[in-house]
Image (cartoon, helix red, strand yellow):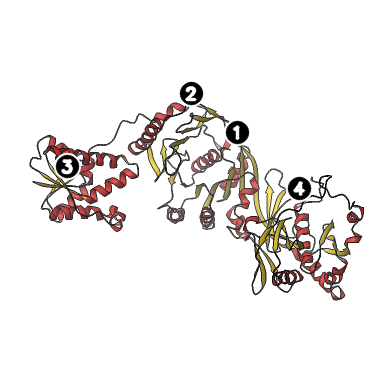
Amino acid sequence: MNVVPDTSAVVDGRVSERVADGTYTETTVYVPEAVVAELEAQANDGRQTGWDGLGELQELARLDDEGAVEAVFVGDRPTDHRVDGADEGAVDGLIREVAVEHDATLLTADYVQAETAEATGVPVEHVEAVDRTVTDDGLSIEQFFDEQTMSVHLKTGTVPKAKRGAIGDMHYQQIGDAPTAETQMSEWADDVVETARTSTDGFLELSEPGMQIVQYEDYRIAVAQPPFADGIEITAVRPIVQTELDDYEYADELRDRMEERQRGVLISGSPGAGKSTFAQAVAEFLTDSDYAVKTMEKPRDLDVSEEVTQYTALNGDMAKTADSLLLVRPDYTIYDEVRKTDDFEVFADMRLAGVGMVGVTHATRAIDALQRLVGRVELGMIPQVVDTVVFIEAGEIDTVYDVQTEVKVPEGLTAEDLARPVIQVVDFETNRPAYEIYTFNRQVVTVPLNEESDSRDSGVDRIARQEIEREIRSVARGHVEVELRGQDEAVVYVDEDDISYVIGKGGGRISEIEERLGISIDVRTHEENPSAQTADPSDTGGDPGGATPEPQGTTVEPEITSRHVVIRMDEHVGETVEVRADGEYLFTATVGRGGDIQVSRGSAIAEELEDAIDRRQTVTVVPS
């Protein structure tokens, strides 16, 4: 008698079972290499079915040695194409081909495989699949949790630890007496994964070599193993409080705001601040208010009611999830968490499609959550994507911002022709603008508006000083200093030889600069600078033994294009730096968001820089 078992029959141990009860005598068992490949792949993924199947193959080898059965491994291992198509029956087809080739009966516990074999004329014996459901006794690591435990942290060779306390007052503490042995960690890891596989209350959210993420009841558990981690590590997290929207400050205002129309909301805060807990409260409120609510999560760990369907990344891509959700047509979607550029793009796309969006994102300040949209969403579209920012700290609402757009002259500037679209970030409590975001000379700037501050060095002042300095340095050859005298007046100090260059014929050049910036500029020499006249030349500001040493610069190789001289400085994005040639100062500039300094060819600065390049001088960049 010839028999070919498929993967399901091997996993269930049906071959050795039939040898033991005398059904198979003088039988040759042809084991397809395709079955071996499938079991090996399952075992590598940490699936118990793979280990059970490999155990059955070892038992067949033992029975072959004893002469109770003849076990022969035949056929070719499946190609990558066949493995990729396993769900479509490609590997099953390969197994049926082995049965036909060896004139054998196909043994299977797979109903579809049995029906297909019968339809194609392959002799088949269909057996019932083994009931693999086990009693759900819970997780062995639950012993480490009490009512105040938010997370448990276990790792080979370390003492078990946990975060315990109330939200906003968590303490990382030891909860064991001795380091955990690797054998114990391996048992706990296997228990977590297998419990999730066999329990109706759990599932495996992610399974990659070295990392598995399990959702079991309200626990989210990450199991990391070598080679991904340097040892077996288990991190289990669960929510310790359930809240309602009414438990938070501004509850009435936020309720009215979200019921008025679908909104774009960003819930922000630092890790462990209570963002997800608040998001769950919002989801329950919206559901109780007769809105259709869905979630987008990877992993799915929000603790929401059964009415809220929780979606994860479809085939690993949240954009595909969004496409599916647009067909489902939810009123609101909770997106946990919005972190990468792709996440912000999907969030914006769904919001602009008319879906109410509530996103959860990490931020250390409320304004930081909004700034994460800058560069990822067109500036003018930000208020249409996010109109409300809620910042959570220590489990409470700390700040709420209303995001609006207005065409106006930015605060601190006065020239009417500088009017532009300005994003106003308004404090929900005081109804006063807290920040303005706008484009200034091709740069997106976020300017804090603090009416109580007496400091003249406001955000606008700093920006204005930088822009004035940039404009003057484009025509001056020597050192430039800028002093602001008010919101629309400044004094520029330059070398005496540069006065004529800066002012230009008939004052034309300085007038053009004043018109561009909307600021009146008075040009003077350094000798007329009061701070220079009162300074003690002998005071170097360093130690008594001598002057403070010059900071070391980074040597660069400027690139000359048709329109610009470009200096690449990726590691200094946003910093103000000095550019020098053979140690001699050339100019000061701010490294752009693209990681470069661009000097327009034809300007005095560009000519001086190109001259230094032609003379093979060493060009260095020094932090200002």
- Tally the numbered discs: 4
Query: In terms of sequence position, does the residue under pointer 3 or pointer 2 come before the other?
Result: 3
* Numbered mark located on residue 127 in the image: 3
Q: CA distance from mark 4 to mark 1?
A: 28 Å
Q: Nearer the viewer, residue 3 or 307?
A: 3
Q: Nearer the viewer, residue 305 or 101?
A: 101
User: Disc 3 vs disc 1: Cβ atoms closer than 8 Å?
Assistant: no
Number of residues whose C-alpha sits closer than 10 Å to that of mark 3, classed few (under 14), some (14–19) or many (20 or more): some
Going by the numbered disc 3, the residue's amino acid type is: Val
Across and down, in percent, residue 456 comes to: 82, 51
User: Disc 3 vs disc 4: Cβ atoms closer than 8 Å?
Assistant: no
User: Residue beneath label 4, please?
Assistant: 450
| Residue 421 can be seen, yes or no | no
Q: Is residue 116 left or right of residue 329?
A: left
Location of residue 256 with respect to 328 vertically, above or below:
above
Dot 2 lies on which element? loop
Residue at the spot 61% in from the left edge and 35% down from the top edge: 394
Residue at the spot 58% in from the left edge and 43% down from the top edge: 255
Location of residue 452 with respect to 583 vertically, above or below:
above
Going by the numbered disc 4, the residue's amino acid type is: Asn
User: Disc 2 vs disc 1: Cβ atoms closer than 8 Å?
Assistant: no
* Numbered mark located on residue 177 in the image: 2
